[in-house]
Image: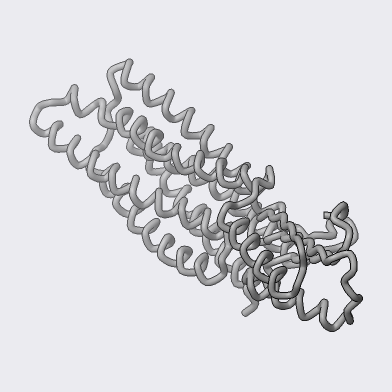
Amino acid sequence: MQPVARERRVLTLSLAATLLSAGGSIVAGLWIGSKSILFDGMYEVVDAGMTALAIVTAGLIARGEDRRFQYGYWHLEPMLAFVNGIALALACGYALLDGANGLLNGGRDVSFGSGAVVALVSGLWSLAMWAILRRVARDLDSQLVAVDARGWATGAVLSGALAAGFGVAGVLHRAGHGDWARIVDPAALVLVALALIPFPIATIRRSGRELLQIAPADLDARVRDATRAVAAAHGFIDCRSHVARIGRQQFVDVALVAAPDALPVAYERLDAIRHDLAVAIGGDGPGTWLSVDFTADPRWI
């Protein structure tokens, strides 16, 4: 199976699993009166919408370049991740305010035993999906699948924490500490929101750097070292390099400056130099857009 086809297939699987999990959490949250579980379901609905967009994006990336988007559709990958991060961060902010309001109003009664079971099942479901998506993300080097996998991992941890919290609340309720038990659900909502929000913020930061085309330090250093080595090996007197990473695509521009009195060389040798440079930067595959300029006039670099 082609990598992009496999990517779309696993994202479709994740979408179906997310909708199933979200529906279960929303129904369960309404049934037992738990806003923390209800928020978990609504958070998954937002995530499902982002996964659906990721499937569309993966299809566009597979089309390659065309006359309108002559560098391909790679820029949609960080754009989608950025929108995903914004949407989830706003959802966390709303949950934080709702939970704080619940604490100020004395909490709420919840069916703690049922809540613990629902949260535990949700956690195991999320853990299984995370394991599947993490392996695919590594195999395909896919930011889209990696973002989705992080969402499932976060859900697994937080569902486990909710299950533990409801278990403690049930013990408090049976021990006659009903007032303490009542604040467990809004307190859990606040803690879930606080625990979740670093993940969309990290996604916003990472994808924002790509949208702004901030040069990745690792790629910049690797290309600069490789360019200098190739320039020295082939007798060029100066060189420059510029890099950017957008999604899985790396864009590398290199300029090699020959001495003004250097003799012209055959295209075959220029192609060999370009090949040496591509191998040196690890960019001889389809994931790198490499442009190499040869000139004897430093103004062109």
Q: Where does the image place residue 143, in percent across and percent down from the top left? A: 57, 58
Residue 104's quadrant in the figure? top left
Left or right relative to 264: residue 165:
left
Residue at 13% across, 32% down: 172
Q: Is residue 300 above or below residue 65?
A: above
Q: As drawn, which residue projects farthest toward the front? A: 261
* Figure check: 111 above or below 241: above
- Residue 118 or residue 96, whichever sits in front: 96
**Quadrant in the rendering for residue 278:** bottom right
Q: Residue at x 80, y 59 (%)?
A: 71
Any part of residue 285 in sight:
no
Q: Is residue 188 above or below residue 287?
A: above
Residue at image location 56% in from the left, 50% down from the top: 48
- Residue 173 spot, x, y in % from top left: 15, 31
Q: Residue furthest top?
A: 105
Of 213 and 294, nearer the camera is 294
Q: How many marks?
A: 0
- Quadrant into which the N terminus falls: bottom right
Whether residue 223 is visible to the viewer of this picture, yes or no, is yes
Colour scheme of the picture:
one colour
In the rendered image, residue 43, in percent from the top left (x then y), is placed at 48, 41
Q: Is residue 174 left or right of residue 73?
A: left
On the image, the x and y values in percent for residue 2 come to: 65, 77
Position of 285 relative to 15 (above/below): below
Q: Is residue 274 left or right of residue 70?
A: left
Q: From the image, which quarter does the C terminus lie in?
A: bottom right
Q: Toward which corner of the image does residue 181 lie, by quadrant?
A: top left
Question: Residue placed at 47% from the left, 34% from the top?
Answer: 92
